[in-house]
Image (cartoon, grey):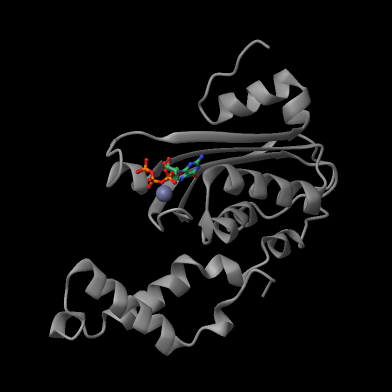
Amino acid sequence: MNEEHHSQEVSQQQAEDAVRTLLRWAGDDPTREGLLDTPKRVARAYRDWFSGYESDPAEFLRRTFEEVAGYDQMVVLRDIQFESHCEHHLAPIIGRAHVGYMPTNRVVGISKLARVVDGFARRLQVQEKLTAQIAHCIQETLQPSGVAVVIDASHQCMTTRGVHKRGVSMVTSQMLGSFRDDVRTRNEFLQFIGIHGSAR
Ligand SMILES: Nc1nc2c(ncn2[C@@H]2O[C@H](COP(=O)(O)OP(=O)(O)OP(=O)(O)O)[C@@H](O)[C@H]2O)c(=O)[nH]1
Ligand SMILES: [Zn+2]
């Protein structure tokens, strides 16, 4: 559990009461039969959606493989589907992350990159912060010569409300080390994930 975790200060009863308040605010009656168990379900759903507060994503990267320690070429995991929630509206952010790194001597099990994505996605987020957090976590823990993270996601706060623009997706990237400094490395990564890089 990390310092961002505050839920121990809120009881289950208080959380459920808050949901009942919002149901009344929305114009419904929380005492009608169909809504009786809703506060409990919502509290459980929050535990799932925001389970990232219970995890320290760096821990997923602690176990590295010696057998492949000599491998120093790019490793890319692309199309990592994730669900997150925007910190402005609590609306879902649904998208895909592409993560690459250039190992020096620490190589991790490939599923761990997806666990890192989920560890940060299952919190209240803005996409830029999510992108940066994933990249910096991998950089600091594995100390590779570079890390690249590209996220392509749709924000339900702008598809289902507000400006109501469906089909819009937001693309963010965080390039560190060799992916930032070396255009060939960056382009190779972008090619792997199906985005064409530039000549400069
Ligand atoms: N940069 C960035 N903006 C986001 C993200 N998620 C939501 N937003 C935006 O955050 C902004 C919040 O703007 P506000 O004007 O405070 O909120 P609002 O009145 O609900 O804005 P509208 O969505 O335009 O109705 C909106 O423009 C959202 O589209 C994100 O991950 N990154
Ligand atoms: Zn939003």
Answer above or below: position of 38 versus 191: below
Quadrant of the picture in which ligand 1 is shown: top left
Residue 3 image position (x, y, % from top left): 69, 71
Q: Quadrant of residue 163?
A: top left
- Describe residue 33's horizontal placement relative to residue 156 as left or right: left
Q: Residue, x 76% and y 49% (percent of image)?
A: 107
Q: Is residue 90 visible?
A: yes
Query: Which quadrant of the figure contains the C terminus?
Result: top right
Q: Is residue 77 visible?
A: no
Task: Specify whether 68 is left or right of 135.
Answer: right
Residue drawn at (71%, 24%) of the image: 185
Residue 168 % position (x, y): 35, 33
Residue 1 x/y as whole percent: 67, 75
Query: Where 186 falls versus 17 (above or below)?
Result: above
Q: Position of residue 133 (x, y in %)?
A: 66, 49
The vertical placement of 122 against 199, above or below, is below
Residue sitting at x 14%, y 85%: 33
Q: Nearer the viewer, residue 124 or 109?
A: 124
- Residue lying at the far top in this picture: please name it: 199
At 41% from the left and 89% from the top, the residue drawn is 13
